[in-house]
Amino acid sequence: MRPPNGLAMWPADALAFFLGFLRDPVGVGSVIPSSRYLERRIVDAVGAASARVIVELGPGTGGTTRALLDAMPADARLVCIEIDPKFADHVARLGDPRLIVRCCSAEHIGDVLAEHNLPAPDTVVSGIPFSTMPADVGQLIARRVHDVLPPGGSFVAYQFKSAVAGFAAPVFGNHDLSVYEWRNIPPMRLWRWRRS
Ligand SMILES: C[S@@+](CC[C@H](N)C(=O)[O-])C[C@H]1O[C@@H](n2cnc3c(N)ncnc32)[C@H](O)[C@@H]1O
């Protein structure tokens, strides 16, 4: 369910997110969840309305997850991979039958899909902070995301800093979308790459 008109996000989500930031500022990378404007850009960029399987890396308290679920077909699947156990529990409480939540790091994306016997995802969408992770981890995640995608499948990342492009471009080549969303704290840039 979306927050009532006039509220940018559920207050309980905003509080849980801020507490998560206090637990791990570097790993969470932001003090509040994504705005509705950024959620809309994400939903459009991933083509959620026609997706069969989407993987979301770093759902946090699940605002972006809800927006994706609202747009996805009734028989689609959304796999969320979240490293913070409290956030993973929070997202799992959305209780949507299309949703699979796994608490682990994004580099295990291939194992998670295999364990759930899921086909290659149409898209992998990521809000994880590439700018603060060790370079070898960022490179590994970009490579593994690439390897689980089918030809034409997309990797969509939204970030304040551009480190993610430094990891994704050597693996995917040129992006086919780059757009700023200023109505977010902090302002975010969203990129999309496709597996050739
Ligand atoms: C900026 S928050 C984005 C939250 C939410 N998607 C949003 O837009 O409001 C980044 C999230 O990525 C998670 N995260 C960080 N590193 C991760 C990793 N290696 N694997 C999975 N999740 C990770 C953090 O715990 C946090 O929930």
Image (tube, rainbow, N blue to C red):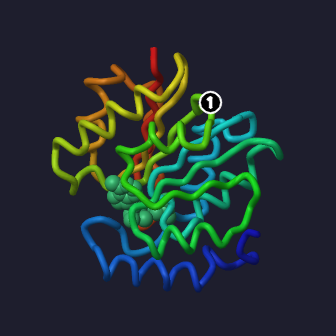
Looking at the rendered structure, the kind of residue marked 1 is: Pro
Residue 151 is situated, as x and y percent measured from the top left of the image, at 52, 16
Residue 196 falls left or right of residue 3 = left
Residue 36 is situated, as x and y percent measured from the top left of the image, at 61, 62
Vertical placement of 12 versus 66: above or below? below
Residue 131 is situated, as x and y percent measured from the top left of the image, at 23, 52
Vertical placement of 170 versus 3: above or below? above
Q: What residue is shown at x 43% (from left), y 48% (from top)?
A: 158
Mark 1 is surrounded, within 10 Å at the Cα level, by few (under 14), some (14 to 19) or many (20 or more) other residues, namely few
Q: Is mark 1 within 8 Å of ligand 1?
A: no
Question: Residue 115 appears in which quarter of the rendering?
Answer: top right
Q: Quadrant of ligand 1?
A: bottom left
Residue 13 is situated, as x and y percent measured from the top left of the image, at 56, 79
Mark 1, residue position: 119
Secondary element at image label 1: loop
Q: Number of marks in the image?
A: 1
Vertical placement of 75 versus 12: above or below? above
Residue 186 visible somewhere in the drawing? no
Which residue occupies the foreground of this view, 194 or 92? 92
Vertical placement of 40 versus 4: above or below? above
Q: What residue is shown at x 50% (from left), y 27% (from top)?
A: 149
From the image, which quarter does the C terminus lie in? top left
Q: What residue is shown at x 40% (from left), y 47% (from top)?
A: 189
Question: Residue 96 appears in which quarter of the rendering?
Answer: bottom right
Q: Residue furthest right?
A: 74
Residue 42 visible somewhere in the drawing? yes
Residue 195 falls left or right of residue 100 = left
